[in-house]
Amino acid sequence: MNTNKINAQPPWGVRTPGNLEGGKKDILLSLAIICVPNVILTAVLLGLVFHYQVPQTYSVLPGVPNPLSRESSAYLIDFSATKLLTVASWTSTLSSLLPSFAMVLVSFPVARSILNASKAKRTDDLPTPYQLSMLLGVLSGSVGSLLAWFKYRSWKKRELVNGTAKTSITWLIFISLLGYLIVIADTWLHISTSTILLSQALPGVSVVSTFGRGLNTSNSVCFDDEVGSALAPCSVAVGNHGPHYINAAEGYQTLTNTSSQNSIVSFTFEGESYALITSAYIPPEASYQAQTFAVNTQCTFLTEECTSWYDGPFEGPWRCSDNFQGYLPNWDYSNNVSINPSWTLAGVDFFQDPGLTQNFSNIGGSGKPGVSLFGWDEFTPANPVYIGAWGMILGFDTGSTPLLNYSDFIIPETPGLGFILGCSMTAYDLDYVWHNGTVLVQEIVQSNTSLVSILTAPFVVELANLLPLGQTAAGENTPSAFLYTWTTGFSSMVLALSAGIMSPRATIKEQATNTTLVARVPKVPLIVLVFLTLLYAAVGIVLACMAALAGTGETKSVQGHLSVAALTAKCFENRDRYEGPVKEVSEMFSENEVGARDQRCAKVSIVSSTRGGWKYELMERDEQGNPVSIRHVGSKTPQAQIQLV
């Protein structure tokens, strides 16, 4: 080793001060830690939102609104809400880790201010020892250090807080507040983000379903012949022993909603209730346009009008017109038996006029219910057709139902609920769209009269049993509810009993919908979170510029001494090592030269003082391995004194 060079070094007091190195590296590293993760997380979050944003789809069906795939106040994302919020939560987690790096950047202009004040000997701009201790806490990024400053301001006797300390405190408060705002925005986003069901229209599919309905093309009587040229409409057949249904099983299965082929759907159009016939199974995701038949029935009560002429306790007879009269049966009239016994309790008759005077049946000029079916030669060739309906629902007595409080109903001597209705029924050719279980009418026109003859034939020949319909309606509490239930049920019954002579028809248009779970991300909390995260990165850039302008030579040396490590070296290391030229703060410690494994470096202890308090003391082992305390005397070498422990 060239000892001449070593001996040629000037004494400590006249050497040129050496500066700590790594100022630029510290600035760039702190800037990168603040900016890069924030920018990357924001980019990933926005990338997921916009990459997986649900695209707008369009319906090919008329009258069907396009599915809602866009909201003005939220993004709909085809991505797991949990995973998306996990990415968002990283921003709040990161914000709690960054104040210390931001304060590293703040420490450079603080160091420059202290350096300038020290050179100019402006004591008012320098901190007191206690202020320095608090300043070191602030520059470490400890939010808890702010509490010490607030307590300090309450002291009655204290030094004024200089501008350098105020600047440091302000920056720590601002950075901490910004971090808390990011946590709040992230919490807001977590609370307001939800998972919802979203239906999307899939691209149009080729027509493959048969949800429409029409008359069976294989039945020549239904499809080709006029009603008048056949013995009876194609929904019934009349043999030597009476009438019967065509394909009776399908009609009854459709009526009881057990059919695998057909079903009856009720819907409302322009305030009126209708029934249509369609397929028994429609997939939940299917939307389509098809054609079918629909029926609408409207009724009013005639009970009071048709029984008001009768004096004394009501015994059953009623009269609405010469062609529409009969009995609401009781024990006095138990011998009034018809072909279908249920028609003694409930039935209908068909007319050409709303006054119920022109009956279609011409047997002896009588249109009364209960006449023999043989000889019926006309089956209601009219649309609309007018209906007189009556019913006696047994088992009711005074006070047993709210309906008896209305004059629209009557109780004869035999307990029961009696009613008489005047109705009109209209059959339609319906073009409709089925979407989300809703019927959207595209075109509805009255059918030809032959369809009404087909639909009403089971009632004309008295095969239909209307008693259950009356019993269902009798369960209502008001006359209006009774009418709604009866008319809706009658329309459904008319179509169901003729389902056996219906055949499927291909849909006009068809479109499937896909229902999926998507994340609904509100825009406002997302925008706030992104803004605050990018603002944090922008603050990092501003602080880095301030640090760079403060310089990295002497400023870095002062900045390095504004640390707990440097202050510890001042307290426990010898003066030559602490005040000597070093490149890094860690070089101020003798531990750099003594290995840790042989336990030869001094250790810091806290012991009681002879002055009644406590003190720091260095402790090490001597050559014999005995622990001794050493006292730092401020010279180049520590003076051991020595106290066996």
Image (cartoon, rainbow, N blue to C red):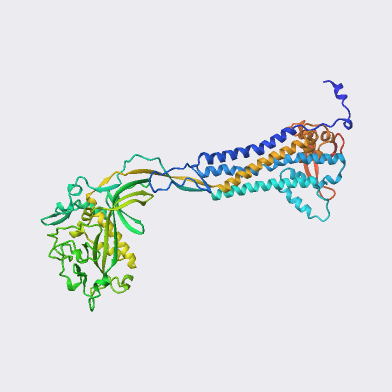
Task: Give the quarter of the figure containing the C terminus.
Answer: top right
Q: Quadrant of residue 491?
A: bottom left
Task: Give the quarter of the figure containing the N terminus.
Answer: top right
Q: How many marks?
A: 0
Residue 428 position within the rendered picture, expressed as x and y whole percent measured from the top left:
28, 53
Residue 343 position within the rendered picture, expressed as x and y whole percent measured from the top left:
20, 64
Work out whether residue 382 can be spotted.
yes
Vertical order, 230 against 106 (above or below): below
Q: Residue at x 53, y 40 (%)?
A: 50
User: Is residue 34 or residue 59 the one in the foreground?
Assistant: 59
User: Is residue 47 or residue 380 the one in the foreground?
Assistant: 380
Q: Residue lying furthest bottom in this view?
A: 312
Work out whether residue 562 can be spotted.
no
Residue 602 position within the rendered picture, expressed as x and y whole percent measured from the top left:
78, 37
User: Is residue 216 or residue 36 the one in the foreground?
Assistant: 216
User: Is residue 625 or residue 235 the one in the foreground?
Assistant: 235
Q: Residue lying furthest left in this view?
A: 240
Residue 115 position within the rendered picture, expressed as x and y whole percent measured from the top left:
82, 39
Q: Residue at x 83, y 54 (%)?
A: 157
Q: Residue at x 63, y 40 (%)?
A: 38
Position of residue 170 in the picture relative to residue 64 (left or right): right
Q: Quadrant of residue 535?
A: top right
